[in-house]
Image (spheres, grey):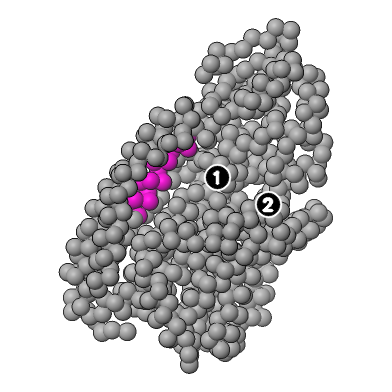
Amino acid sequence: MFGPINKTPALLTPVGILIMGALYALLWFGSLDYRHLIPSDEGRYAEIAREMLVSGDWVTPRYHDYKYFFKPPLQLWATVIAFDWFGVGEWQARLWGALTGFFTILFVGYTSTRLDGPRAGWIAAVALAASPMWIISGHINSLDMALSAFLASALCALLLAQHSKTTASTRGWMLLCWTFMALATLSKGLIGAALPTLVLIAYSLSAWDWRIWKRLHIVSGLLLFFAITAPWFILMSIRHPEFFEFFFIHEHFERFTQNTHRRPGPIYFFVPLLVAGFLPFLFQLPGAVAQAWKSRQGHFSAGWMLVCWFVIIFAFFSVSRSKLPGYIIPIFPALAMLVGRYLDRQLGQTNTLPITWILQTICFALVGFVGFFFLSFVGVQAQPDEITAYAEYTQWIAVALVVLIFFSSVAAWQARRNGITSIASLAIGFYLTSMVAGTGHETLGRAVSGVDLASRVRNVIPADAPIYSVRILDHTLPFYLGRTMIMVEFPDELQFGVDQEPERWAPTLNDFIERWKAQPNAYALMVPSQYAELERLGLPMEIVDRDSRRMIVKHPSDPANPTPSRATNR
């Protein structure tokens, strides 16, 4: 560690940190309600939580009233509470992910401060707060952010435990570590415990440090872990004997080793996501890893533990047969702490940054400038009814590019004058760029969400009318309608649910047609091409309303002479 800087930069004072944190929180939480939910995760998990709230059954997750055993319920419980306290809506559905993501930024900053000093802690928090993947994930209703937050918190608690000087402090932090692993497990499954275990093994082998295992408080930790996680798993296995095989075998081992979900991806799938997700501080990673490598011998090395965390998780998901972008989000807190340590050393006592930092900030400004020449390609594949939406989104991207150019230029100008200000400028630029581009996606996402269609037909469809979903699983419209649907022929990810309760769905199109003819109060959701096919078959239907992607029809009051509504030409 370096000695104290001659003059503490304003951004590192308590007042400066408080102001920056307050402004960041205002934008972080204030933007949650701007966008409507988009498929598939956002609509799916919001709808499952809504159904849990309506049914009052907090044990068995259901989607469209079908058994849905893919994931544990912690985030669902948190969302149900948000719905119950604040009402059902978009920001309530995103609140848990936003809270856990924001908490992790604070915890990363605190941990790095304890390990490496206030300046390193401030840089680590800023680096994570400016990471595009972390920002975007914190504003999407999916399980990846909460899982990543609890895994990162478990890592932080582990580092603090190993850094502690007293047995009582070590035990306290380790029990907190076990608690966070339990919460990660209740968020997305066994991976909440498997990944930290793999990282510990890799660290012990690569650093030849086995003493750490004596400081894990394994017995008391395991008792606490199972006390938190076991009740729900046991209760589910008792109520639903089919749960154990599906959840533990199919959703864990088969998902990892087989292409059951048709999401294989090449071995390099996560490389561009790593680059884009940590872009502001990407160029500091080689030096940070080299610095950690040198510190790995002779005693516990927090830096090398962070490297092992990054490498193992990145490699684990790279070799998996199932890949989605959100899987590598847990690596970013570790990368931020590595960068915090490294840039703290780069700043030294002079609070200036090297020429390499200036060059990268200039490059970011140039990238923003060049981006204007590619704006015309944003909506090049847009459908005729999407041209206006893409034109509006292009304006949001243009604003984001201006923000990137301005703050990158400020960062370059400040690098040799005030390194802390330079780092803050670059971080602010990437944070605002990500927020502007992400928030502006509403111009495209609104149509995808189906919220406008739902608002027009919500009060038209009687409460007791069955709604069929014909060969389509729409992930957002049911949430905005506040209604579940009966699947027809193509259950998609609800295959397990319809297999368990086959009486709840129509397995073939012919079965649906027979039911439709016998239910004069029935409604159905379908895509336009499906409507045309059924129209050719002579099925009596009357269009209730439609948008560019979907149609809602009803059984006509006069089957012999169905009259399309005015919404046909919408």
Residue sitting at 48 percent across and 92 percent down?
A: 298
Residue at mark 2: 261
Amino acid type, callout 2: His
Magenta span contains residue 427: no
Residue sitting at 27 percent across and 62 percent down?
A: 361
Furthest-bottom residue in this view: 298
- Quadrant location, the N terminus: bottom left
Residue 4 place in picture, x, y as percent: 24, 81
Report the magenta stretch's main SS: helix
Residue 212 place in picture, x, y as percent: 56, 86
In the rendered image, the vertical position of residue 479 relative to residue 259, given as above or below: above
Characterize the local packing of mark 2: few (<14), some (14-19) or many (20 or more) Cα atoms within 10 angstroms.
some
Under tag 1, what secondary structure? helix
Amino acid type, callout 1: Glu
Residue 300 place in picture, x, y as percent: 49, 86
Residue 231 in view (yes/no): no
